[in-house]
Image (cartoon, helix red, strand yellow):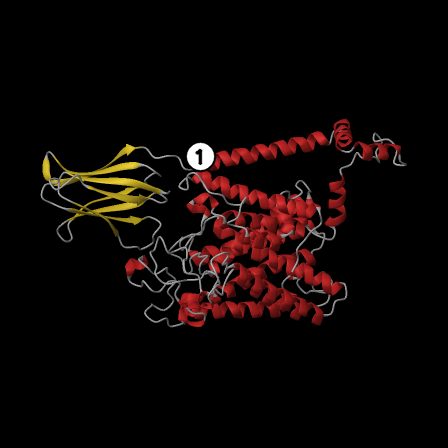
Amino acid sequence: MDEALLLVRSELPAQGLRLAARSAACHRCSYQLLAVVPPSDGGPGATAVVDTQHPLSLLLNGSRAGSELCKIQYHFGEFGNYSLVVKTLSTNAKTIFCDIVINEGPINSYLPILFAFLVYSGILAILIICRLVMKIGPVRNWVYKKLNPRETDRLINSELGSPGTADAISSDPSPRLWCATSRQRLRSLDTFRGLSLIIMVFVNYGGGKYWFFKHESWNGLTVADLVFPWFVFIMGTSVALSLSSMLRWGSSKQKVLGKILWRSFLLILLGVIVVNPNYCLGALSWENLRIPGVLQRLGLTYLVVAALELLFTRAGADSGTLEMSCPALQDVLPFWPQWIFILTLEVIWLCLTFLLPVPGCPRGYLGPGGIGDFGNYPNCTGGAAGYIDRLVLGEKHIYQHPSCNVLYQTTVPYDPEGILGTINTILMAFLGLQAGKIILSYKDQHKQIMSRFFIWSVVMGVISAILTKCSKEEGFIPINKNLWSTSYVTTMSCFAFILLLLMYYLVDVKRLWSGTPFFYPGMNSILVYIGHEVFENYFPFKWKMQDSQSHAEHLTQNLTATTLWVIISYILYKKKIFWKI
């Protein structure tokens, strides 16, 4: 999968060749030897397996040191069969000519994505048509009568009158429930959370083994890099709303703090259990117990942000009733102590990242190590962030297979949920908390809320543009999920504010969309997340494939498993079963 076969044929007499390659996605990497090619009279040539995910730069050297013969940039196709022909021009024996010939064409590995998109689009179209048809009175009454004739007859003969009247079964019960509960709970928040969660489940299950559904090797973004910060963001938003509600209903701060501590403890405990599965492999050794993880980071982040909100909350500040000298900043100025705390944390992150001496590494190093930076710092993966984790937690207690492991050929462990990155996760949650303050400060003022979301998105986008210089690799602080860099947080917050704005407008303001199907997993997020981790290797979420090297089979399996969790969350919602911590 994601590979092709390359046959190197040399027509140069009495000269052996060395073929090396470098991926276009590997920043400042040295060339890696692919094959040694014998002279034309020494054999049939050499074969090499090449990567097809990104374009490759091929470098062909002669047997003499420093004799570069040719360099070719080429993007190979999956399962393709190619030949690299090396020969001299007939007119000039000293001029080396290199050409790539396609022996057998590659397959189009993206067709399964198109097919899946058409299938889900068809299902969506059918559901929309059925919903529209069900709005036709006679059709709806006929369906209800066929599904539950006794209940229909009872309604007809009851004091409600005939189904043809305005007060009979002519209105769908779900919109009534929606209208009744929308005053207490914003559906857009659960929809946002559910969307993040479902994408997270899909990419955790493998994402069809496509590279853009996996985490980026180092700097940059893929689809998989979007979801965790969005989940953290909406957690912060929910913290603002839930704490405001609890305090408004008379709960003491001591009681609320107790709930915050207990919930944080449970999240961390569940996280340690989930990331260290042993199943039928025997007892787990404490020597290899991984300490950091997604739920652990969520627990720590929740503890800091919720305690910060509880500590500095002021009566009337979250409802816009305080008199302000600058009403345009009523969602910011009353909470200046929180901003000072968060900015202090960010200064700590910057100082540790750029000033902490790391043995054998340049100060402020943000690279992946391995063969990156031309192999000068092979053991410096993550710079200060990796060093702190290895020093405090120990190499055996952090993630052993980081996303940079394959492309950059790193050898040291690195944990993307490590200690230093937690600081910027807190910043991400705090920006989500700010979204919650906007909703509370401008309650029922939809235009104000949406304009504030848009302004915050623009501000975060401008900060990201400055930090990155609008470049993937050359900015002051590149976008990096492994490091949870500041630019990564501001970029994800920019996207999150825009996405929340759209969902708030469609779901809660105009009610053009009920949030289905993402609303249901959003209402049971902890259960879905832990469930998908625990049952990942069990049927029907996983089964033995006929062809494990097929994107189509992997995509089918991963989409099926993800869809099943949506269905499970829908059933649980209908049965009013919610697992809350």
State the image coordinates of residue 513 (x, y, percent, origin top left): 66, 41
State the image coordinates of residue 578 (x, y, percent, origin top left): 68, 53
* Residue positioned 67% across, 31% down in the render: 130
State the image coordinates of residue 507 (x, y, percent, origin top left): 66, 45
Q: Name the image quarter holding the C terminus.
A: bottom right
When asked about the image quadrant of residue 328, the answer is: bottom right
**Amino acid bearing label 1:** Leu
* Residue positioned 83% across, 29% down in the render: 164
* Residue positioned 33% across, 68% down in the render: 361
Instruction: Kindly tell me whether residue 494 is visible in this rendering.
Output: no
State the image coordinates of residue 533 (x, y, percent, origin top left): 53, 53
Q: How many marks?
A: 1
Where disc 1 sits, the SS reads: helix
Residue bearing mark 1: 111
Position of 279 relative to 13 (above/below): below
Seen from this angle, which residue lies furthest right? 159
